[in-house]
Every structure is written in C-alpha cells, then in structure tokens.
Amino acid sequence: MKKLPRTVCLCVLTLVLTSSVAVGQLRRGQRGGRPGQNQPTPVSTPTPAPVSTESPRQTSEQAASATQTYKPAIEYQSFMQLRFYENQGGFLVEDLEVVFPPSGSQKATFVISRPNGQVVSSVPLRLETPLASYTAFGMFKPDGVPGTARIGEPGDYVLSVHVGGQPITTLPFSMKREASNDPFNPTTTFVREGPWRDLAYFSNRPEEPDSHLEFSWWTSLRELPPGTKNPLVTLHILYGGQEIAATRSPVVPTQTDWQFLYHEFHFPSEKQVRWMTLADLTKRDGEYTVVAKVNGKPFKSYKAEVRGGQLQRHPRNSLNTEPHTDFISPRLVDVSARTSSRYAMRDTYWLKKN
C-alpha cells in the first residue's frame, strides 16, 4: 500500500483523537448505563484538523494508517472494570475497549497467567472496529465462546491481552480468600488487590470545555477503619490545605470487592450550586489533594498538580510509555449510553493514591 506522508498521518491522528473516551457505576459500557449521580471530566480542546476534501474511502484508509502510528493497547479503565465473580474467583470478558486497534486479522486472546508466564485461563477474542465513529478505538469481544475466565485459587496473577502472541497491556493483581464473620451465613469469597486501590482519574469531554469535572475511583469496605458503622463517603478537593470543592451527597459503599464510583464537585462556599469545571481546577498552579472521607474522617487521598495552567497527567499516560504494556490511554470512549450514536469521548487525567 502506498505510504502516506508523515504530516498527513499526524493530521488525521489529531482528527481521530478529537473524537474518543469514558465510564460508570457498572462500567460505562457494561450493561446498565450510567447511574444518575455523576458526570464528565475536563481537558483542553485540541486544535481541529482541517476538513478533508478526499473521498470517504481515502479518508478511512488514512485514518487506519494514522492509527497504526502507535502500538495498540487496552483502555485501562475498561480492563479494571471487567466483571469479577467473587464467589468463584474469576472474570467475565464481555467488552474490552482497545486504543489504536491492530490492523489485519491477527489473533487476539485474553489471558490470565501467573507472574512466571504460566497460563491459567484464556478467552479468544475478535475485534470490532471502528468503535462507532471513533476510528482510533475498537472493541474486543469473546470470539464464539463464553467469556468466562476462571481462576479459583488464591495467588498472584496477571491479566493481559495478547495480539499476534505478544501482550499489549498487562494488569498485575493478587487474589485471596476471605471468610465471612457472620455465624448464620458462613461464606468464603475471593477479593483482589492491585491498581483498584491506587488509581483514580479526573475526566471531561474535550469538545465541551465547560462540562462538569468528574472524578472516578475505586473503593472497598476493606479500606475503611475497622468497626466503621453506617459509612457515608464524601470527596473533597483541597488547595493549600483549604477545601475549595466537595461532592454534594454522600455515597454508601457496598459489599462489592472493588466498587467503582464517579462524582462531580460543587463549591460549598457559593450560595447557588455551581459545578466545578476543568477551567476552575486549572486557574491556579500548584498541588491539589482529593481526599476521601468516611463519616467526616479521611481514609484515602490522591495528589494532582496544575502547572502552567495545565492539569498534569500520570507518566503512564504518555504515548511513549515503556514498557508499552504499562500504557494508560489519556482518552477513552464512554459507551454507557448503550447506543453508538450517543457514545462520547472523554479526556482522562490519571492520579495515584498518596
């Protein structure tokens, strides 16, 4: 195939990336749509690419070429939101969003392995692309088989997707048994440890700079102080040690192994309710802290930094991240609307727990 000039590829890639990213309480894109409590995250609006005068076929081919400028990767939130069976210790593979989908008909496989590479379970995958109108994104689905990936034993494991026999994204985690302390209902379940405890992200819709800033994170009752009764969880944003914004309503954590939550922030000091945007967060340079409190007491926090009027991204958000299996895409497509005509791209700024 005729090789395209680098400038054309980059131009098309800008157009591609201006169209894609997202999440929900059940994973945005996992059956159930987006619950009513939360909404979007912010990022600067990219410069739009010039309108193409070429035929649709030419434009599509150029977009595919531009996509392959970068290595494929699984969108990390999609990976973290795989349905987990606590009673059996296993996963259900339904939809795995892929960034810069691989070209051709290379075989893809979802793999659970031991750290030494020993395969414990696997599911063959097929690629659907593009993801609606977002040519830089696609979706992996089970290829003609149930998407069940069983483990059933405690230990250290690695989730990964392999394309052409090589892993493109990995997620290390550990799993252990946990016994119920209820004498009338003695049960044993599996619980996980891994990035769910440590990672979170701000997000917004890049085509709507004034959209509400959203914060997405994972929590578990295991993180709360022992003996906590009737837990009510709230989030607070601090700047210079002073609270500047907070969530409006508390959340009651469930028994879920790791519960995915997302929130918007308002300004308690203002008389009328006004929701925080990315511009609100980035108007002052410096360090910000997102503090999670249960019944008014802090139990977890994340650091964010604004520099030169820009919210700084996690090092793993870089397109040049090495090893590339650690790459976390700075954009995702929110598929929680269930209808492709309403899919939306979101910019994501990942943070790590203090």
Image: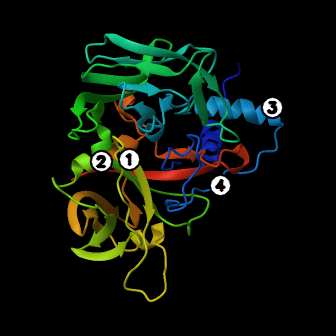
Q: Say which residue label 2 marks.
A: 220
Dot in front, 4 or 2: 2
Q: Nearer the viewer, residue 82 or 222?
A: 222
Q: Residue at x 25, y 51 (%)?
A: 353
Q: Residue at x 61, y 32 (%)?
A: 138
Q: Are marks 4 and 2 in contact (CB under 8 Å)?
A: no
From what the image shows, is residue 138 above or below residue 102? below
Q: Position of residue 124 (x, y in %)?
A: 53, 15
Q: Helix, strand or loop at disc 4? A: loop
> Which amino acid lies under the numbered mark 4 shown in the image of this protein?
Pro
Q: Say which residue label 4 marks.
A: 48
Please tell me which of labels 3 and 1 falls first in the chain.
Answer: 3
Side (left or right) of 59 relative to 232:
right
CA distance for labels 2 and 3 = 48 Å
Residue that protrudes farthest toward the bottom in the picture: 271
CA distance for labels 1 and 2 = 6 Å
Q: Say which residue label 3 marks.
A: 57
Dot in front, 1 or 4: 1
Q: Helix, strand or loop at disc 1? A: strand
Please tell me which of labels 1 and 2 falls first in the chain.
Answer: 2
From what the image shows, is residue 7 above or below residue 304? above
> Which amino acid lies under the numbered mark 3 shown in the image of this protein?
Arg
Dot in front, 3 or 1: 1
